[in-house]
Every structure is written in structure tokens, then in C-alpha cells.
């Protein structure tokens, strides 16, 4: 299994917290939670699914932290 490192942004919004990986945002790599911890946990699952889909479809995965 390969390990990837991505910059993650966590921001407060009107109803909770938004977490996203800027380099994968166009692929939908974002998640929401009532707490920052929940948003990060959800994002981890989203990132796993996003990367699996990208590998399956032969899409390039960013090699550096963005």
C-alpha cells in the first residue's frame, strides 16, 4: 500500500466545519462535520475513495503536497 501526503484545509462554516484537500478538490475531496475532528475523519474516508477511483480510472495522482 502506498502512502500519500496531502495538504488539508479545515475551515469553520455557518453550521460546522469543512475539510478539503486543495489538490484534489476538483475530484470532490471535501467533507463536512459538526466538529473539526469529524470533518477530518470524514475527509480521510473520502480521500481513500477518491484515490481508489483515480487509480481504477488511470487518472494521475498528485505527487507533491499542494
Image: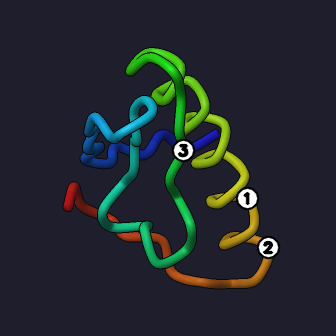
Q: Is residue 16 above or below residue 2?
A: above
Crowding near the residue tagged with mark 1, few <14, some 14–19, many ≥20 C-alpha atoms within 10 Å: few
Q: Do the residues labelled 1 and 2 touch (CB within 8 Å)?
A: yes
Q: Mark 1 or mark 3, which is nearer the start of the sequence?
A: 3
Q: x, y (%) of residue 4?
A: 43, 46
Tell me the tag on residue 56: 2
Residue pictured at 75% horizontal, 68% vertical: 53
Please tell me whether mark 2 sits on a helix, a strand or a loop: helix
Image depth: mark 3 or mark 1 in front: 3
Q: x, y (%) of residue 47?
A: 58, 48
Q: Do the residues labelled 3 and 1 touch (CB within 8 Å)?
A: no
In the displayed structure, does residue 21 sit left or right of residue 29? Answer: left
Please tell me whether mark 1 sits on a helix, a strand or a loop: helix
Residue pictured at 60% horizontal, 84% vertical: 59
Residue with the mark numbered 3: 31
In the displayed structure, does residue 26 sit left or right of residue 56? Answer: left
In the displayed structure, does residue 29 sit left or right of residue 17? Answer: right
Which is more toward the observer, 33 or 3? 33
Image depth: mark 3 or mark 2 in front: 3
Q: In this view, does 55 lie above or below 1?
A: below
In the displayed structure, does residue 62 sit left or right of residue 26? Answer: left
Q: Is residue 11 above or below residue 61?
A: above
Residue with the mark numbered 1: 52
Q: Mark 2 or mark 3, which is nearer the start of the sequence?
A: 3
Amino acid at each position: 500500500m502506498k502512502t500519500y501526503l496531502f495538504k488539508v484545509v479545515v475551515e469553520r462554516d455557518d453550521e460546522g466545519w469543512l475539510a478539503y484537500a486543495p489538490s484534489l478538490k476538483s475530484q470532490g475531496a471535501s467533507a463536512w462535520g459538526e466538529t473539526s475532528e469529524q470533518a477530518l475523519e470524514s475527509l480521510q474516508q473520502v480521500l481513500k475513495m477518491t484515490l481508489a477511483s483515480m487509480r481504477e480510472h488511470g487518472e494521475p495522482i498528485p505527487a507533491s503536497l499542494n
